[in-house]
Amino acid sequence: VGALGFTATGIAAGSLAAKMMSAAAIANGGGVAAGTTVALMQSLVVGITAAIGVIGAMGFTAAGIAAGSLAAKMMSAAAIASGGGVAAGSTVAVLQSVGEWGRQGSW
């Protein structure tokens, strides 16, 4: 989505997203209507960026789970509950994957 020009700070000038926004605004008589594809895509990017920020602040980072963080406490509890390891697909595992993926800027 970012490659199309939808960014956390707005639609990038000269991008496909900018062309889509321009066409939508012209078709709507001067503004992009709420609920259109352009509006939804931009909202999605802002929402994903905010969620990744919260997950990172919890301690789920690209470098791993941060020592002393909420994520570390969650990992410890999950490992104890499952007999010594964090189960694949668990909340902790998924949040760590999102934290790593989001910080790489690959989305």
Image (tube, grey):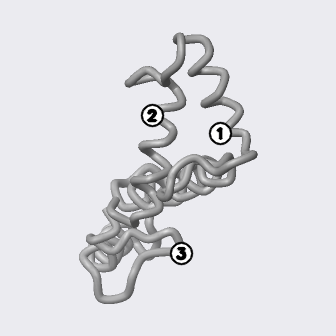
Distance from the alpha carbon under mark 3 to that under mark 1: 27 Å
Q: Looking at the picture, how far across and down is residue 54, in whole percent?
A: 65, 50
In this rendered view, identify the residue nearer to me: 10 or 68.
68
Callout 3: few (<14), some (14-19), or many (20+) C-alpha neighbours within 10 Å?
few
Mark 3: secondary structure: loop
Residue hosting label 2 = 94
Disc nearest the viewer among 2 and 3: 2
x and y percent of residue 50 in the render?
A: 59, 55
Q: Which residue type carries mark 1?
A: Ala
On-image quarter of the N terminus: bottom left
Residue designated by label 3 = 9
Mark-to-mark CA distance, 1 and 2: 12 Å
Q: Secondary structure at mark 2?
A: helix
Seen at 44% across and 53% down, the residue is: 100
Q: Of callouts 2 and 3, which one flags the residue occurring earlier in the amino acid sequence? A: 3
Q: Earlier in the sequence, mark 3 or mark 1?
A: 3
Q: Is residue 91 left or right of residue 41?
A: right
Determine crowd level at label 2: few under 14, some 14-19, many 20+ residues with C-alpha closer than 10 A: some
Q: Depth-wise, is mark 1 or mark 2 nearer the camera? A: 1
Q: Is residue 66 left or right of residue 40?
A: right
Residue depicted at 38% across the width and 24% down the height: 88
> Where's the C terminus, which quadrant?
bottom left
